[in-house]
Image (cartoon, rainbow, N blue to C red):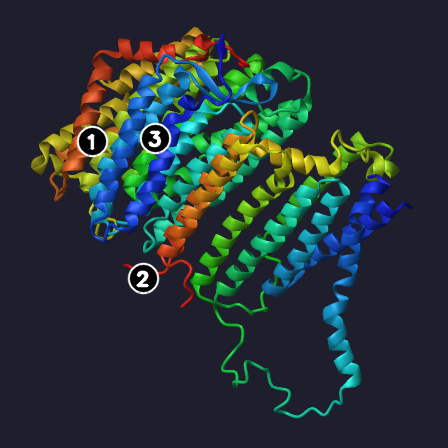
Amino acid sequence: MTNEVLQNWQFIFIFVALSPIFPAAPVILNRLLGPQKPNAIKQQTYECGIETVGDTWIQFKVQYYIYALIFVVFDIEAVFLFPIAAAWGLLGLFAVFEVALFIIILAVGLYYAWNRGALEWF
Amino acid sequence: MFAAPTLNLWVITPLIILTVWAIILMFIDLFIPAGKKQWTGWLTLVGLIPALALTLMQWGQTGGAFIAEGGQPMVVVDNFATFLNTLYLLTGILAVFISVSYIRDAGLERGEYYFLMLFSIVGMMLMGMANDLILIFLALELLSIPLYILSGFDTGSDTSEESALKYFLLGAFSSAFFLFGIALTYGATGTTSLPVILDTISLDDPLALAALGMLLVGFAFKVGAVPFHMWTPDVYEGAPTSVVAFMSIGAKVAGFAALMRVLGQGFPMWGELWQPAIVVISALTMIVGNFAAVRQQNIKRMLAYSGIANAGYILIGVAASATDPEAISASLYYMLAYLFTNIGAFAVVIAVEKLDGQKGLLVEDYKGLAKRHLLLSLALAYFMFSLVGIPLTGGFTAKFYVFGAGVTAGLYWLVVIGAITSVVSAFYYLRPVLYAFMYEGPAVARVSRGLMFVLVVAVFATLVFGIFPGPWYELASQATFGNVATFVAGG
Amino acid sequence: MTSQQVIFIILAVITLASGLVVVTNRNLFHAALAMMLSFFGVAGFYVLLEAPFLAASQLLVYIGAISILIIFAIMMTRRLMSTDESPFNSQWIAALFGTLLIGGLIIFVIVSVFSPFGDIIIANSAPPSLAVQESTVLLGRSFVDPDQYVIPFEIASVLLLGALVGSIAIARPEKES
């Protein structure tokens, strides 16, 4: 790995290093600066202002899983399109048709899933 | 010498028709109300029959499309591919006739069944046409994933779900082997194109040897050859019978198609290396398949082991092709004859199966069938005779050619094992026939019109192959790689 | 030590430590989260190996999608938080043996290819024949070039469509039936 390559990635590395600080900072600052007078009601789990009922770790419905499966399919579609986007300036009209065909075939799948009610949560 | 234009869509026209029709059918299916889904089934034929017609028109033609690295095409159409494509399309058409009434009566009637089947057929056809390992892998997945789903199509039944899960896990496992084999091949040769592999592979490269081994394991899983056959009985037992009828032929033939092309066009000069491996697998497959089948009480499990055993017989031709590329014509003919016999046998199983609660699947449930359904019982007897290999059946001529190819190649003891195990197979094949004719019993059957059509076609075809095998074997012998022109890049 | 070696060691520690958490943690959910971290370390390796497209795929597919799928699958199981079961079952000795066998084999291959041992990490760092950005661009071109991989590319979309239809067929809500 050459230094030049390393330089291309240095921003990514900096982002990776810095990004945990942003969510961590408010939490830590809160802990340091805020007054701490706990009581039983304050210690309760907060859930949209409603009192929690039962265990929070409940069994989820299968609909979420279909949702995730469909997400995987379109995620892979995005991965396929990513290098084409990188090469887009070099491609001709034929490539446009190819990519359109690729997307249309998967759009059919989306329409089908939608129509079958696979995108409903209920 | 064949000079192909770069974008030779004629080669893949049947595939395009099937894919486009599957997608259109998805839309049509949305407007077909539940309870009328048999229309989706019959409409499947609108895609399959033109695809079959076009495939038949491609007979005798040799061409390639999508010229890739090394000037070699990604997809080829030659007599080998056309012969096998015809087999898949015939299987698909017959499977539609079997399925429509079966899945309605079993309460599984949903439109997905049919277009998943179409997707699977596209994958099968690509298996024989692909000239590149990457494409073979994609075809393998395209054929397998719909079959995993179809195995578990009976979502209310635990055995069906078990079958789908086992099929999926072991299928994914074997795909991993296959993929690893592709990766090692690429490591050894720097290419995935079969003809380029042939040109660049060096015989003493241990990496290439490991690659070939991995590829063989992957294929052996797919065709259900011993010792990679464990999934077959459980999957066949649990999956809906119409699905089993379809995949026991389609998936197996497709596995063999890719195996033959990879061995015959990618690694032919390694014949003396892979021949012993195939011989051992073939012998084990015949022995284990036939002896395990003897013990089965469930007819679907019995036919599963029978399918394993038949994979062993087909492998004789593959093993013989190491020394004589023409020998695969025997295997091709075997698959043609096996298609009709096997689908006929499954049609009888479906007719006898009672759909309320998975009954009528034991061999004993055939007791007394001949009293009420003489013609059906005769058809059953004929298919079983054919599977044993009794003369005047397609199964006999198929075994005759395969054993002949084995003898010509000098694989005498393999042929001896084949002959002995054929005798063993009579024990279990003839048991349901014996029960049907010799015993009293309450067996009843329901033969829908679609099933009747399949039975008639299967009996007729098995008879034709049994009495006039010559012209059909001639077709099969035109479909070997020996007659295929080398592909050259075209402008 | 060069900067790459420092990065490699950091990534290796992240990947191996989180991998160890995955197999030893009693809580499945926490194991899944640790697995995401392990995937992240692997993505880092791909960057070091100058395979940015693989790194991006690893992030998008494995961390973005597969992990979500696994977490949803865990949340669908019934005794979700039962942490009383040990992750070691009766076959852990066989598993250990198999793992050691494969690990030993891999180490043997690496050592035999890149001896002397000390240079393993950097021995293969000769740049591949393509420059880095170029490899992604070339891949993109080959996907849509009729003289290369256009047919596998389109077949892949059909495969994804089949998988989508299939997943709906087996898991869709029992609304219509």
Could you tell me if residue B222 is visible in this image?
Answer: yes
- Please determine whether, in this image, residue B117 is positioned above or below residue C145: below
Asked if residue B167 shows in the view, the reply is: no
Relative placement, left or right, of B228 versus C67 is left
**Mark 2 or mark 3: which is in front?**
2
Give the camera-side residue of B474 and B21: B21
Q: Which residue is mark 1?
A: B454
| Residue at the (31%, 19%) spot, across then down | B56
Q: CA distance from mark 1 to mark 3?
A: 15 Å
Going by the numbered disc 1, the residue's amino acid type is Val
Q: Residue at x 59, y 64 (%)?
A: C29
Q: Secondary structure at mark 2?
A: loop
Q: What residue type is disc 3 on?
A: Ile
Report the residue marked by disc 3: B249
Q: Would residue B87 be found to the left or right of residue B223 on screen?
A: left
Image spot of residue C104 (x, y percent): 73, 39
Residue in the foreground of this view, choosing between C141 and B63: C141
What is the number of the mark on residue B31? Answer: none
